[in-house]
Image (cartoon, rainbow, N blue to C red):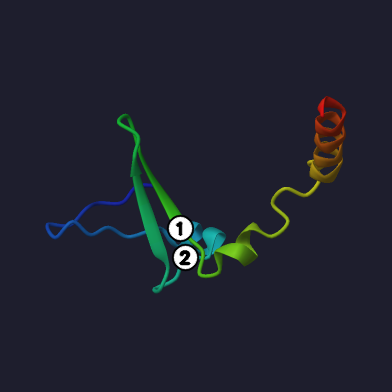
Amino acid sequence: MKTHVTRRGQTVIPAPIRKKYGIDENTTLQWIDTGETIKLIPIPKDVVKALRGAAKGEGLLQKLLKERTRDATKE
C-alpha cells in the first residue's frame, strides 16, 4: 500500500491497516526513527489492558521460582 504526503505533512493511513490495528481518530501514534527506517506505533488507549496476557505461555512463574531457589541456596 502506498500513500502520499501533502504539503502540510499529512498522509492517510489505509483503511485495512486502521481496521487491523484499531486506529481511529483519537489514537495516539508514536513515530520512531531508527536511523534507517521510520516505524509508526499505535499507542492503545488502555496500555495495561493491551498488554494483559502478553507473556502467557512463557513459564514466567516457574522461572521465578527456580531463580528464588537458586538465590536461597547461595545464601
Q: Position of residue 31 (x, y in %)?
A: 34, 50
Instruction: Name the residue located 69 percent from the left edge and 60 percent from the top edge.
Output: 52
Other-residue count near label 1 (Cα within 10 Å), few / some / many at <14 / 14–19 / ≥20: some
Of residue 50 and residue 48, the one placed in the foreground of this image is 48
Q: Is the residue under label 2 in contact with that under label 1 (CB below 8 Å)?
A: yes
Q: Position of residue 29 (x, y in %)?
A: 38, 59
Q: Position of residue 16 (x, y in %)?
A: 50, 59
For disc 2, the marked residue is: 23
Residue type at mark 1 is Pro
Helix, strand or loop for disc 2: loop
For disc 1, the marked residue is: 42
Count how many numbered circles sit on residues in the image. 2
Of residue 20 and residue 62, the one placed in the foreground of this image is 62
Instruction: Name the residue located 45 percent from the left edge and 62 percent from the top edge.
Output: 15
Helix, strand or loop for disc 1: strand
Q: Position of residue 60 (x, y in %)?
A: 79, 43
